[in-house]
Amino acid sequence: MNWADLNLMPALPELFMSGAILVILMLDAFISDAKRGMHYGLALLTLAVCALLQVQTYPVVPVHTFSGMFVSDALSSLVKLAMYGSTAIVLVYSRQYIADRGLLRGEFFSLALFALLGMNFMVSASSFVSLYMGLELLSLSLYSLIALQRDSVKATESAMKYFVLGALASGLLLYGISMIYGATGTLDLALVAKAIKAHTANDMLLVFGLVFIVAGLCFKLGAVPFHMWVPDVYQGSATAVTLMVGAAPKLAAFVFVLRILVQGLEAMVADWQAMLALVAVLSMAIGNITAIAQTNIKRMLAYSTISHMGFLLLGLLAGTPDGYAAALFYALIYVLMSMVSFGILLGLSRAGFECETLDDLKGLNSRNSWYALLMLLTMFSMAGVPPLAGFYAKFAVIKAIADIHLYWLAVVSVMMSLIGAFYYLRVVKNIYFDEAQDTSAIVMRADMKLVLSLNAIALLVLGVVPERVIVLCMQAMKQSLAAI
Amino acid sequence: MFTNQLSLVIWAPIVAGLLVLATGGDQRATMARWVAVAGALIGFLLSLPLFTGFDNLNGGMQFEEVKPWIASFGIQYHLGVDGISMLFVILNSFTTLMVVLAGWEVIKKRQSQYMAAFLIMSGLINGAFAALDAILFYVFFEGMLIPMYLIIGVWGGPRRVYASFKFFLYTLLGSLLMLVALIYLYFQAGKTFDIQAFQAIAKIPLHVQILLFIAFFLSFAVKVPMWPVHTWLPDAHVEAPTGGSMVLAAITLKIGAYGFLRFALPILPDAARELSWIMVALSLVAVVYIGLVALVQTDMKKLVAYSSISHMGFVTLGMFMFTGSHLNQWAVEGALVQMVSHGFVSAGMFFCIGVMYDRVHSRNIADYGGVANKMPIFAAFMMLFAMANSGLPATSGFAGEFMVIMGAVQVNFWYAALAATTLIFGAAYTLWMYKRVIFGEVSNHHVEEMADVNKREFLVLVVLAIAVLGMGLYPQGFVEKMHLSVNDLIAHVAQTKL
């Protein structure tokens, strides 16, 4: 590598973030417990600067650097911006919660930012190696974040489960990647794509590799039949960490899947389309049906996530630019929705009390009608009822699969969302129809109140005028995929 | 009056609803009520120019508005009304005003949320009737489930949770399949969701038409509701508060029937012809069988709910009276008159029951008797609505039923004969209930303590009574508005798409 030619500009936000994380980590050793709140401010500042740098370096055409390992294109920039936003929101929501539970330490913030850094590399990777490195940085940070609450048996258990199963999935993924490497002789996504198109690769080896890769990817997304870890991890982790696992990483995982399957293995679309169709149907079915039986909201939301991932895969398996854009739109909206739902849970929890069963939400309307309304909007959005953003997300993916004439899949998916509507309605029922069991006052920090309100209202606003975001997704997809 | 009259009619109630919501908790209930009544009144006044400014000589869309909305998906903000939908926009704005008055001091808890839910729903319903873009229609059509779900669930009776879930999930089932059908049509119509473009699609094979028709059928038949997917209605009606029942019966049921006229018939004319015998059969079952079911009810609200299903059977019957490839004009217009009339009459009936319920807190027929002795004014009004419900000439109930029967006779005598039984059943269940509740000796101390209607209740009753009588004496005023639009519809349905 010629150092003089190394273009660091495309990776400027990442470089800044790495430096900032080290500062936060170092600072932790020098400040007293009373001033821990400083980390919170620093982390938010870091995210703001990163977002600013990201906007400044928003690329007109994809730019590669680090010998083609790293790419900065519209897709990665858009998703990174969303991830900065969502991480910042998660930190705001978590502030009080982690302070109440003794987690307000430098490690929490540095690990959260390390996870974000890993995600950034995942979405900007243009080679299997950098993809994998980003994924591992994310995963290891998440494992440790969960285990950070070390005196909680449940948290330790779920960290262990997540770690063991995650390692297994990484192994599957690596194994698949090695087969692809064996078949094509390269790890660069663009070169892999070229080799497959030119039919110079060993088909048998490729298909085997693909199966392992899809299995690994489904694990990371949390799609059936590789979903077992999701409910346990969601339930066992501290709610703030659950949100950390459930929000931005889903976006990163989606782009990760997109990079591998679409940019690398697009020529095998017929093979992975069939696999993903099966996975999508199973995820929607098992996710939605099992969610009905849950009494713990975190677990219910975990199953709801599984079903959402099924929907997201629908857009992906359409194999058209519109479908990919629809899936990206779905992922963005999903992150917005899951942040409000967990945000409310975080807001209702307080020192010594975890809001995590359906009963804890009973009578929320009589306790605080504003938060009740925010949760109502989120639940109906998740159920895909217009005029909320979740409707357009579902609409976009269903339209994408109808475009490739998979009408049976469209009908199956709408039936699954009908089943799903039941448990979202049940949450609304608890909030509005039932009497409160717990009448203690709800105390939220002002910044959290504001962000939570804006976050939920965004669902309504995007439901009324979704056009801008849809166009953004389409443009990002077009620009980034034109490169291959 | 304004260039964007329809947008105003849709958004004014919604904005008013948000304002009402902003008044906050029950400590400012009086303010919430006045804001609500002002919003409903403004909404109603804004809808009137649609009627007065309507050009009777134009069968097409009027007051049209087209703006880009979600261009990437081919969705436009396209509004417009013809002689069919215009009537329902006005009926809805009118009913909302009545509902706000009906809930005045009756609703004790969460006044502002109650009023806001109705106002927002009113705007959404206007939107569904005025939308000329399929997805815009769908958004309004589905969006109204949210306020209705809350209305039943929060302010409803003992089994409100069950009723609200049943209502929501039943309606969602149908509409989701319709969504897939709409997406199919989008690709057929050249990547647009414009309803008129859907209607103009030149060729759709019969088997596809039938599948699409089934999707539309499930969506709209649940809303109407037609037998056998009607079971949510009695539950929802019985458990809903008075205002909820009034809106459900007067308006939301009409959206289902309207959907058949706007989507199923003109977009899929061949399937409609092929399957018209099923629609006729289901409608006749609703008229006869549900009429008999109504006869044995012991709960007044349930009785009127079943009577609504039976009357809506008349509506769907009128809409599927084919002679060859032509719909019968009498029958279609009769169905429309019946829909508007049923809007007034059922609102009146449910309001009357609500008035009694507020005093005695029972809906059981057996708990009443001799109400006329204590509430003579009220008894007189209820008499009028009961007569209209049984289709007495000179009330609005008669005009529609008579026109549908006239049309049916031209198509098939036996259809008409079976349909006409409703005049007997309708009279039987309504008047028998009326007799047991209103006449006779004062049966118990609850009835003894009943006070006659107050000014607010009197106002609602008078307005509804004027509407019922006015429409019964001069149906022509409504028919002339819809005449050309119905002609257009019939001409359109007569073309084949095979």
Image (spheres, coloured by chain):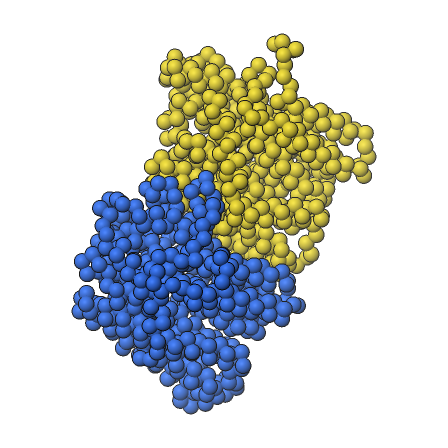
Chain colours: A yellow, B blue
Quadrant of image for the N terminus of chain A: top right
- Locate residue A204 relative to residue A437 in the image: left or right: left
Q: Nearer the viewer, residue B351 or B77?
A: B77
Q: Is residue A112 left or right of residue A311?
A: right
- For the question of whether residue B286 can be seen, the reply is no
Question: Does residue A463 lie above or below B103 as drawn?
Answer: above
Q: Which residue is at 69% across, 44% downward?
A: A97
At a point 59% along the width and 31% down the height, the residue shown is A80
Closest to the observer: B347 or B236?
A: B347
Instruction: Give the image location of residue B245, x and y in percent.
Output: 45, 68
Q: Position of residue B449 (x, y in %)?
A: 52, 86
The residue shown at (46%, 88%) is: B376
Q: Position of residue B114 (x, y in %)?
A: 55, 65
Image x and y of residue B261, in percent: 32, 58
A150 relative to B459, above or below: above
> Image check: A186 left or right of A11?
left
Q: Choose between B145 and B59: the one closer to the eye.
A: B59
Q: How many marks?
A: 0
Picture quarter containing residue A414?
Answer: top left
